[in-house]
Amino acid sequence: GDVNISVTGGTVANIYGGGAHAKAHATATSVVNGNVNITVTGGTVDRIYARGQVDGDSLNGAATVTFSGAADFSTKLFGGGYNGANVGETGLSQLVFSDYSGTFSGSIEAFDAVVFSGDAAAVFDGAIADNANWVFDLSGNSGAAAALNWADARLAGDTVALEVSSGNAADWTLILGGSATDFKAAAGYTLYLDGAADGIALELNGAALADTGTVFDGYRLYTEDNTLRFGRIAG
């Protein structure tokens, strides 16, 4: 079955989503047949290994690590296992910042995607490694603040997905920080309207959307003053 772990306070050293076993027992295994959901809203967590600890541990499902609230964290996050362990895996590992408005100064490594959802207004002040896919779920975002404030934003070679609902049209600042040069070096931007499986390729600073049949006609993805934005340009 699924594993659900929630941290709301206190101090935690390590969390192993896919279980753990003593290294001294070389033939031992730890198996989770289901999904793992790890949610952190408070306290202090040193490290989170989304899928497991060492060789022989396995997770046959998806692993999702979610941060919510406004607390600051310096957690070291790993989408796989401890120290690059060969943990079995048959699902994706996602890191989600949902309605999160604190400062994250830890590290992020080896997740399949980093997702910003709800009214996320996260501040990154740490090392981001091995992440090639960014997802901005704007369906519940009011546009009141940048979804991500990251002075050292780096998207070169990465893919960026925008998920929007025609019931929520706003002008959004996706990323505050970085540079137009770096944003242009991303591997690609894709817009997904109302949960559609097929996306619309977006050209950065290109033409506005047209004939989409939604309120997003006239929207475009663009850079402005070292920000990455999706909306209408005034005037």
Image (cartoon, helix red, strand yellow):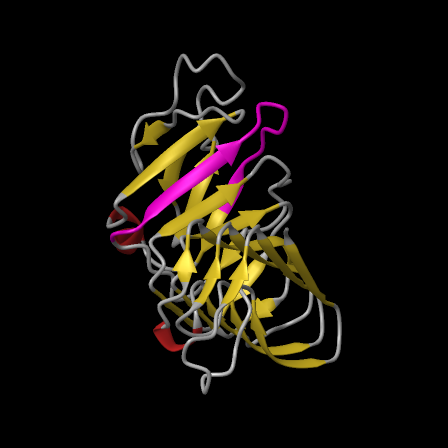
Image location of residue 190, percent across then percent down: 37, 34
Can the viewer see residue 69? no
Can the viewer see residue 93? yes
Report the residue that reaches farthest toward the right: 9
In depth, the one of 71 and 43 nearer the eye is 43
The residue drawn where x is 39% and y is 16% is: 210
- Above or below, 122 relative to 90: below
- Above or below, 126 relative to 94: below
- Above or below, 98 relative to 104: above
- Above or below, 209 relative to 27: above
Q: Which residues are magenta?
A: 157-173
In depth, the one of 141 and 227 nearer the eye is 141
Report the residue that reaches farthest toward the front: 27
Image location of residue 58, percent across then percent down: 46, 61
Residue 167 is left or right of residue 225, and the answer is: right
The residue drawn where x is 45% and y is 29% is: 192
Q: Kindly indicate the quadrant of the structure image that contains residue 140.
A: top right
